[in-house]
Image (spheres, rainbow, N blue to C red):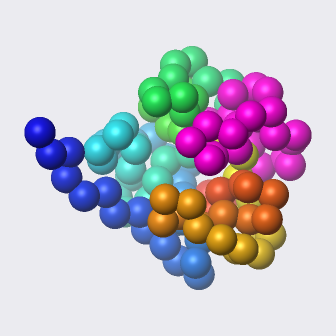
């Protein structure tokens, strides 16, 4: 069984995001609205898929406050509240699974629209 290819929108080197409700899902339950990844800044997860927290309407729960990283899951930083640690300003220093990361291990994203 082949799940297909997942294409993440990258602009200015960062993952392009929106706070819109998902209109569809890519392989591994990544929510999209148009070409943008759907995120929920500061929203507590209600469910988890492969260790990633999802909010009540299917968006990925993220932290943009710089909260302490509690654990790394498959290399991705997770806060104690279960949110995926992200950053909209720090420089991209490396890539993990092809995704842009900061020196602290946070996912480098654009400010959600």
Residue segment shown in magenta: 61-83
Task: Please determine whether, in this image, residue 100 is positioned above or below residue 74.
Answer: below
Is residue 59 in view?
yes
The foreground one among 46 and 106 is 106
Splitting the image into 4 quarters, where does residue 36 fall?
bottom left
- For image coordinates 48% across by 66% down, the residue present is 98
Tell me if 63 is positioned left or right of 65 in this view: left
Is residue 110 in view?
no
Magenta region includes residue 68: yes
Number of numbered discs: 0
Q: Residue 87, percent across and down? A: 74, 59
Magenta region includes residue 59: no
Q: Residue lying farthest left?
A: 1
The foreground one among 16 and 3 is 3
Q: Residue 63, percent across and down? A: 74, 43
- For image coordinates 45% across by 27% down, the residue present is 49
The foreground one among 31 and 81 is 81
- For image coordinates 70% across by 74% down, the residue present is 92
């Amino acid at each position: 069984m082949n799940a297909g290819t997942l294409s993440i929108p990258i602009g200015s080197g960062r993952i392009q995001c929106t706070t819109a409700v998902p209109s569809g899902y890519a392989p591994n339950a990544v929510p999209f609205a148009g070409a943008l990844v759907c995120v929920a800044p500061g929203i507590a997860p209600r469910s988890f898929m492969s260790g990633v927290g999802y909010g009540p309407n299917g968006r990925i729960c993220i932290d943009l406050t710089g909260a302490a990283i509690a654990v790394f899951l498959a290399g991705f930083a997770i806060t104690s509240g279960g949110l995926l640690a992200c950053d909209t300003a720090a420089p991209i220093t490396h890539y993990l699974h092809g995704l842009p990361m900061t020196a602290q291990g946070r996912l480098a994203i654009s400010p959600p629209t």
